[in-house]
Image (cartoon, rainbow, N blue to C red):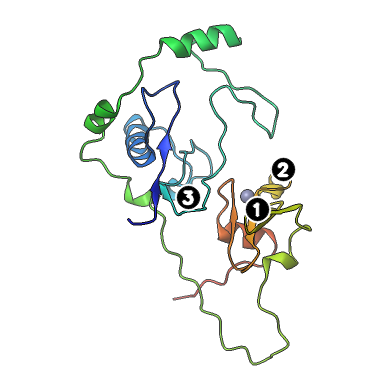
């Protein structure tokens, strides 16, 4: 796909070299299903593992969602999560990670041969009602800027402010997860991966869904 850069997962803790995000995602979805590990989002599940990155590829100038690296501190609760198979201290954890067998590109290709991301996890197109011809010229179109805090900064064509959906769950305390295009406020994106539907619901302006 022209203009789209494929993402690579570059964790040296687990891989010999940076590997295509798409291949890693396909493999992890399939392994989790085989092991019966619940995946958030499956059949409306609210709890379960989340699979990152959420994107296979990005358009120029786009960023993927933010994610916490292994042994990183979770910003919501200030906890560091340890791997179960080693002692709860940095030295043991690093020694454990260093000794793990690293996945190579050839192995990943072999392991994920013929697999695809299960249908239920593919992003489904949401049916969104097209804006009706507005009979009242004074009625304003929805603008996200009317519902968020005053942007903290402006960079590379975007405003940055707190994501209302993240804020609902006590996240984005730094107040800069939501990028809003300066030239067109209809374009906005949460770095932590909240969908437009989640953001609109969080500001009390849910996207109308066409009823059958
Ligand atoms: Zn968010």
The quadrant holding residue 179 is bottom right
Categorize mark 1 by other alpha carbons within 10 Å: few (<14), some (14-19), many (20+): many
Q: CA distance from mark 1 to mark 2?
A: 14 Å
Q: Which label number is shown at residue 44? A: 3
Which element carries disc 2, helix, strand or loop?
Answer: loop
Above/below status of 105 relative to 206: above
Whether label 2 lies within 8 Å of ligand 1 gets the answer no
Among the two numbered marks 3 and 2 on one chain, the one whose residue lies closer to the N terminus:
3
Residue depicted at 42% across the width and 34% down the height: 9
| Image location (x, y in percent) of residue 124 | 41, 59
Which element carries disc 3, helix, strand or loop?
Answer: helix
Viewer-nearest residue: 153 or 51? 153
Which element carries disc 1, helix, strand or loop?
Answer: strand
Residue depicted at 62% across the width and 88% down the height: 134
Above/below status of 79 relative to 165: above
| Image location (x, y in percent) of residue 154 | 71, 55
199 to the left or right of 120: right
119 to the left or right of 166: left
| Image location (x, y in percent) of residue 210 | 49, 75
Q: CA distance from mark 3 to mark 1?
A: 25 Å
Which numbered mark, 1 or 2, is in the foreground of this view?
1
The quadrant holding residue 112 is top left
Whether label 1 lies within 8 Å of ligand 1 gets the answer yes
Viewer-nearest residue: 76 or 98? 98
Categorize mark 2 by other alpha carbons within 10 Å: few (<14), some (14-19), many (20+): few
Residue depicted at 21% across the width and 36% down the height: 113
What residue would you read off at disc 2? 170
69 to the left or right of 154: left
Residue 190 in view of the camera = yes
Q: Which label number is shown at residue 178? A: 1
């Amino acid at each position: 796909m022209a203009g789209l850069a494929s993402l690579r997962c570059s964790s040296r803790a687990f891989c010999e070299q940076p590997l295509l995000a798409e291949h890693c995602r396909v493999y992890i979805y399939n392994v989790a299903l085989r092991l019966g590990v619940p995946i958030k989002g499956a059949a409306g599940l609210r709890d379960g593992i989340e699979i990152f990155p959420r994107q296979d590829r990005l358009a120029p100038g786009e960023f993927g969602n933010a994610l916490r690296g292994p042994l990183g501190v979770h910003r919501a609760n200030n906890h560091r999560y340890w791997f179960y198979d080693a002692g709860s201290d940095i030295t043991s954890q690093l020694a454990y990670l260093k000794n793990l067998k690293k996945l190579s590109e050839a192995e990943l290709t072999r392991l994920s041969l013929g697999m695809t991301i299960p249908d239920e996890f593919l992003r489904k197109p949401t049916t969104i009602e097209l804006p009706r011809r507005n009979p009242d010229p004074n009625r304003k179109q929805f603008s996200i800027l009317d519902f968020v805090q005053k942007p903290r900064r402006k960079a590379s064509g975007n405003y940055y402010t707190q994501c209302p959906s993240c804020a609902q769950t006590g996240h984005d305390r730094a107040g800069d997860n939501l990028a809003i295009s300066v030239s067109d406020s209809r374009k906005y994106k949460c770095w932590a991966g909240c969908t437009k539907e989640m953001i609109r619901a969080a500001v009390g302006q849910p996207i109308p869904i066409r009823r059958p």
